[in-house]
Image (tube, grey):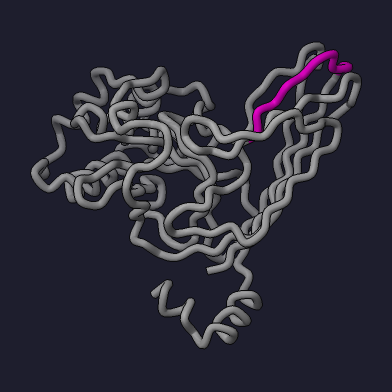
Amino acid sequence: MLLTVKHTTRYSFADKVTHGLQRLRLKPKSTHGQEIVDWHMTLEGAATQASYEDQHMNHVNLVSIEPGVPEVVVTCEGTVRTVDNNGVVGPNSGLMPLWCFLRPTALTRPGAKVRQLLAGIEADRGDMLGYLHTLSRVIGEQVEYVPGTTDAQTTAEQALAAGRGVCQDHAHILIAAGRMLDVPMRYVGGYLRMDGRTEQEAGHGWAEAHVPGLGWVGFDVSNAICPDERYIRVATGCDYAEAAPITGIAMGAGETRLDVHLSVGENRVGMQQQQSDSGGQQQKQGS
């Protein structure tokens, strides 16, 4: 599948910025199951100071905000080719050993609620893949998807106790529970092409577990599925904080307003042309 993305983030400042830095993780990964066909980023009110890959092999742009600007606009757009691998990403690679994904973080530290959740799961832990599917389903049943009820600082314990949250919270709960079972877990931030709509309210988040014999496998608790060809992986981390699309500071900015416009669609014309040029090879590869 060829997916097209346009993601615009606008920060409007009440006062004049004296100094500001932002770390952008907005370029998708070229990994097993997806290929970047083209990708472009434009900045207004800011300039790139450095580009590098972090410890999770995320592509990072470090940008400085121009002093005195009333707003900063970051626009990313491009095309990504994806295939459906039933959520399997494959063996661990990069700079982070698997034991790093067993450590609790501030957002995923388990407590009484996570322990209670695990105690109520009736499934065979000898079949870890099956157990994780059951765990994912139960989390989705116990924590209702309700936008606006949590924020980026909400922990897994807090969301589980409240019984409400969003995709980030679902992922953090699964990560916290999985690590208690000695399963390496990580957070994934990216995009999802929703059926029947192109305009999106925000990006998407899910979890990946490292399962023996398969490697990293994705679990989207919010939609009760493993990621397929509609998903684009952008950044990974031990939790959302390490995979957040934009983080940073703006000194002197005063009150800041954030506006996000995101569209994720399918490039059917490009896919048809590709299949014609390759004699249908891509269609078989993705089936």
| Rendering coords of residue 287 (x, y %) | 39, 75
- Above-or-below relation of 60 to 204: above
At x 12% / y 48%, what residue is drawn?
127
Q: Which residues are magenta?
A: 15-24
| Rendering coords of residue 67 (x, y %) | 88, 19
| Rendering coords of residue 81 (x, y %) | 55, 64
Closer to the camera in the image, 139 or 277? 277
Could one spot residue 162 in this view of the protein?
A: no
| Rendering coords of residue 202 (x, y %) | 60, 44
Residue 18 placement, left or right of 113: right
At x 23% / y 35%, what residue is drawn?
183
- Above-or-below relation of 263 to 64: below
Could one spot residue 235 in this view of the protein?
A: yes
Closer to the camera in the image, 130 or 272? 272
Q: Quadrant of residue 46?
A: top right
At x 46% / y 23%, what residue is drawn?
154
At x 65% / y 78%, what residue is drawn?
269
